[in-house]
Structure formats: structure tokens, C-alpha cells
Image (cartoon, grey):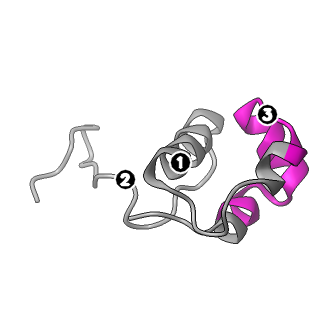
Amino acid sequence: MTLTKQQAISFFGDGVRMAEALGITKGAISQWDDDLDQGKTDRVIGALVRLGLPVPEGFAAPVDQAGEKAAA
């Protein structure tokens, strides 16, 4: 599953915040395709996790009360 560039930007609030979170320039993001490949999607999701921001549904394994991955 992958994201669109607009979805990714919306998770951070704007392109500047997303660029800062990813350690790249806003200009670099402007060169990304509208549909992100898996690598860029993974970078975005990783930055969300690292910053403690909400991760979109479907991108994280369910976790039980003890912090263990729940059985599928």
C-alpha cells in the first residue's frame, strides 16, 4: 500500500514540516511523483512513527495491551 504526495503532506500539516521531518528540502518533495513509491511511503510512515504522529490506518500492525503485535 502506498500514499499520494498530497496524503503524505497532509499528515504533517504542510510541505515544509514534512520536508523537515524527512531531512530533505521542500524542493525535493516538489519533484516527487504524485503517487509515491513504496520507498517514499515507508520514509513518510517512519517519520510519523518517529515523531509520535498518528499513522494512517492500514500502515501499522495492531498491538495488544502488552505492546505485542496482535495475532492476525
**Contact (CB < 8 A) between labels 2 and 1?**
yes
Quadrant housing the C terminus: bottom left
Q: CA distance from mark 2 to mark 1?
A: 9 Å
Main SS class of the magenta portion in the image: helix
Element type where label 3 sits in the image = loop
In magenta stretch: residue 25: yes
The one nearer the camera, 67 or 35, is: 35
Circle 3 or circle 2, nearest the eye = 3
Residue 59: x and y in percent read 40, 58
| Residue shown at 66% from the left, 60% from the top | 8
- Residue ID for mark 3: 24
Along the polypeptide, which appears first: circle 1 or circle 3?
3
Q: Amino acid at mark 3?
A: Ile
Q: Identify whether 43 is placed above or below 70.
A: above
- Residue ID for mark 1: 45
Element type where label 2 sits in the image = loop
